[in-house]
Amino acid sequence: MLPLIIKNLASINKSNRDNNIVETTYFIRLIRKLAGASVITIEYTPEKKVSTTFSWFGFITFLAWYTSYYYCLYRIVMEDQSILRALYNTRLQHYGDDVERFTVGIFTLYAMWKVPFDLSGSTEDAQLIIDVDKALQDLNEPVCYSNSLYLAFILFLIQASISGSRIFTVSMSLHGGTRMPIEKIFQMIFADAIIFTITAQYCSYLFILKRRYRLVNRALNSIRLRTSSEFFKFRFQQQAVPNGIFSIKDKYLCKKIKACGRIYGMLFSATEMTNNKFGLVILIMMFLALLFTILYLYYFMEATASGLFHDPEKFIDFLIYVGWQIGFAISVMLVCIYFSEATVREVNLF
């Protein structure tokens, strides 16, 4: 039943909108507004240009989510809430929690501007991708756009799985009658959601570039291997006019190679734009992931050295909580590295 509903909604969206990268991501932008991750958003104008627009709905949800987050952060600091120290009293005492709160707080403060305003309202990259797609269509390499509603549903499921697994691991770790600090849980889930939003947008943009590089490489390979349909036409005509077809074929080759070079130039500009838009925020995110990995590995080694494993139930609860923290941090790093490496590999194929 659910796939049928998604299919019908997608058909409605497709029939009412132009076939370009901006209009086909309508449902993703809608979910971003609901999550407070899109205050300045983009739209495709009748003049065939990408422009920015202010979303009151996105602004209201933005205020609601971030007000709740900083209220919970205030309660956490005032009450010194800690899930880790409820499981194991580390020698770092409250200093480890203070480092975590400070770094995540600074990152969230930066993300307040970066995600809903800068990344969400970026028009240059979207306009450049639309221009690349038009140039690819002129090369008889049409771009197949993904189903926006289906992709939005998948991203929603991933985010729900991350938040659900976070709540599940905390509840499993604190099952011994210890009160679950609601403010601390909300603060962790919200920080995870910001990291996932940035990672998803970064990897999606790299995937878009990878597909365009693949199409232009396929066009160049058709020239190199003489597999393009136009070459078969030239070969057939050459039998009838042996000396008159070479100049036409040379003009066609020069025109197609020149078009591929122009597309490569636009894709290179889009790649530079990726570094400018995502460079600093990905650097901060990687730093946080490394910091949390080192910090929680230290907690694990300290707890093991102190003999916490002599109490198997408490040690397992501790491992569940620490393991999720380390696993999530490493997963974020691996996903970003994988998509970056896959895009670079696609560029170097030709």
Image: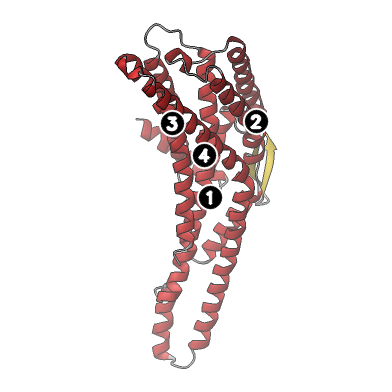
User: Looking at the picture, which amino acid does disc 2 mark?
Assistant: Met
User: Looking at the picture, which amino acid does disc 4 mark?
Assistant: Thr
Q: How far apart are marks 3 and 2 (CA)?
A: 25 Å
Which comes before the other along the chain, label 4 or label 2? 2
Query: Which of the two discs, 4 and 1, sits closer to the camera?
Result: 4
Query: Which of the two discs, 3 and 2, sits closer to the camera?
Result: 3
Which SS class for mark 2? helix
Q: In this view, does 86 lie above or below 190?
A: above
Q: Which residue appears farthest toward the top when viewing the image?
A: 177
Q: Residue 19 carries which label?
A: 1
Q: Which mark is residue 112?
A: 2
Residue 145, position as x, y percentages in the image: 48, 49
Q: How far apart are marks 4 and 1 (CA)?
A: 25 Å
Q: Which mark is residue 320?
A: none
Q: Name the residue under label 3.
A: 326
Query: Which of the two discs, 2 and 1, sits closer to the camera?
Result: 2
- Residue at the image position 47 percent from the left and 65 percent from the top: 217
Residue 131, position as x, y percentages in the image: 60, 57
Q: How far apart are marks 4 and 3 (CA)?
A: 17 Å
Which comes before the other along the chain, label 3 or label 2? 2
Nearer the observer, 96 or 137: 96
Type of colouring: secondary structure
Q: In this view, does 180 lie above or below 193?
A: above
Which SS class for mark 3? helix
Q: Which residue appears farthest toward the bottom when viewing the image?
A: 243
